Image (spheres, helix red, strand yellow):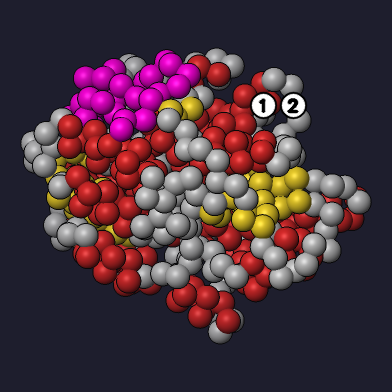
């Protein structure tokens, strides 16, 4: 096929229900724990911070959850998202592999994050909530929630990790366009933010700190609820629309993936593309599900599987997950959305059960692959998505070496047009590869709570 052709595949129909992996797990997911009692947390423990509808989705036993009509209406402005055959990249790599990517950058926020932001804003609106508070790492989640809140007439407050707040000013501008109040985290707005700044005025911030600020804001205001863009079960549930669409689109071509790849920070990106293929594995079909993370924040590849808090201030329930410790502050790499200390409990259990794989890369080879992809396919990927692309390139080159017609599917979860500062640093030779030192990991893990099993 000519390199001048880029394969845009039939869109298919948009699913009307989300896929719930919880009933498919080999054993039940370890429950969240109330940190005060060490006992399993029930709905009553979660209702002060989340609306009832999302709490019910968090613990839902049903294999399918219907998507509400008003959510579908907004989804239709950008869904089904395109599935693209990366013919030019295949030719550049001279690989026999077939490479497909699900392009989520077509949403208003330029990433996959609206898939859950819209759903969460809708449920909160239905329950009479006035304002949502949240954190954001790279700014993609904050952008998505600001947009979703505007669509449903909600106010929005975003605590943006300081290093990204400074690196990505136009993400702040985007959120402000949709009426959000954006604070650099740690901020002077909250008690936890002021304490962190007093202890370390030069801290780059972390998602753990920003989550604590958003939670403190929430519990102090009765008309406010907390909204999370990754990690929790209901968030991963909403994102499965990505993989469901991809399966349908590939089936129309008579293709089935041999490997499904997504970058992994908290887990929503990877889970969105990969979870709908768990059924394939359970049915005996050989398909690898590969989560890719940065070596600077190697949660799945080096973090123990243990109960931990989701935030620095220890305000969340305890979750059993792969973790680097809730006090961990990652290096300021440019993939801000992947700098979280914990992995989604669902992804963590699937890794422990051998259902998924995990791999970590430093950021310079990640950007090498991002530039190679952009020059072949004509799209600038977000630094987070570029981690998946690095693994895709390696898989394709391995297929070339083995003479194997491997089918590779990955989630191109967002565009990089707000991340050009990272590319400037790459071309200037200023990006530094960073492997988390063992002593830093050991120090962070000392804070793990002595509770749970």
Say which element carries label 2. loop
Task: Find the magenta span and give its range.
Answer: 42-69
Say which residue appears at 45% left-offset and 57% top-offset: 106
Q: Nearer the viewer, residue 302 or 381?
A: 381
Tell me, for residue 46, which label it has, or none.
Answer: none
The reply, left or right, for residue 69 in relation to residue 407 is left
Say which residue appears at 70% left-offset and 65% top-offset: 5
Are discs 2 and 1 less than 8 Å apart at CB? Answer: yes
Q: Nearer the viewer, residue 49 or 148?
A: 148
Q: Quickly name the residue at label 2.
A: 285
Q: Nearer the viewer, residue 104 or 296?
A: 104
| Residue 325 magenta-highlighted | no
| Residue 61 magenta-highlighted | yes
Q: Quickly name the residue at label 1.
A: 280
Answer with the quarter of the image where residue 65 lies: top left
Say which residue appears at 37% left-offset and 20% top-offset: 59
Tell me residue 92's x, y (percent). 77, 68
């Amino acid at each position: 096929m000519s390199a001048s052709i880029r394969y845009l595949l039939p869109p298919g129909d948009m699913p009307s229900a989300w896929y719930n992996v919880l009933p498919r797990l080999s054993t039940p997911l370890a429950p969240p724990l109330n940190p005060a009692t060490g006992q399993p947390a029930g709905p009553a423990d979660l209702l002060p911070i989340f609306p009832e509808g999302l709490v019910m989705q968090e613990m839902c036993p049903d294999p399918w959850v219907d998507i509400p009509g008003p959510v579908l209406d907004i989804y239709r402005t950008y869904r089904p998202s395109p599935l693209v055959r990366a013919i030019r990249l295949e030719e550049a790599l001279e690989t026999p592999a077939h490479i497909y990517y699900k392009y989520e950058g077509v949403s208003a926020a330029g990433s996959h994050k609206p898939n859950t932001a819209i759903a969460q804003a809708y449920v909160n609106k239905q329950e009479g909530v006035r304002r949502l508070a949240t954190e954001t790492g790279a700014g993609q989640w904050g952008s998505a929630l600001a947009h979703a809140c505007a669509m449903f007439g909600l106010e929005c407050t975003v605590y943006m990790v300081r290093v990204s707040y400074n690196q990505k000013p136009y993400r702040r501008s985007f959120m402000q366009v949709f009426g959000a109040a954006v604070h650099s985290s740690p901020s002077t707005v909250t008690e936890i933010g002021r304490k962190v700044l007093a202890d370390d005025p030069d801290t780059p911030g972390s998602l753990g700190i920003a989550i604590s600020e958003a939670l403190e804001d929430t519990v102090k205001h009765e008309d406010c609820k907390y909204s999370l863009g990754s990690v929790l079960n209901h968030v991963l549930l909403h994102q499965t629309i990505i993989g469901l669409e991809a399966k349908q689109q590939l089936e129309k071509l008579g293709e089935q993936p041999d490997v499904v790849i997504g970058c992994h920070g908290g887990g929503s990106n990877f889970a969105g593309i990969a979870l709908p293929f768990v059924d394939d594995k359970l049915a005996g079909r050989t398909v690898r599900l590969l989560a890719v993370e940065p070596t600077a924040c190697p949660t799945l590849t080096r973090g123990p599987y243990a109960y931990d808090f989701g935030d620095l201030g220890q305000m969340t329930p305890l979750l059993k997950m792969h973790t680097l410790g809730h006090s961990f502050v990652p290096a300021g790499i440019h993939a801000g959305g992947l700098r979280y200390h914990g992995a989604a409990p669902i992804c963590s259990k699937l890794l422990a059960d051998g259902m998924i794989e995990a791999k970590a890369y430093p950021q310079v080879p990640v950007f090498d692959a991002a530039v190679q992809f952009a020059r072949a396919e004509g799209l600038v990927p977000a630094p987070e998505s570029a981690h998946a692309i690095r693994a895709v390139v390696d898989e394709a080159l391995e297929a070339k070496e083995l003479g194997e017609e491997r089918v590779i599917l990955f989630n191109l979860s967002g565009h990089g047009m707000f991340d050009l500062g990272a590319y400037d640093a790459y071309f200037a030779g200023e990006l530094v590869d960073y492997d988390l030192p063992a002593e830093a990991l050991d120090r962070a893990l000392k804070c793990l709570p002595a509770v749970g099993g």
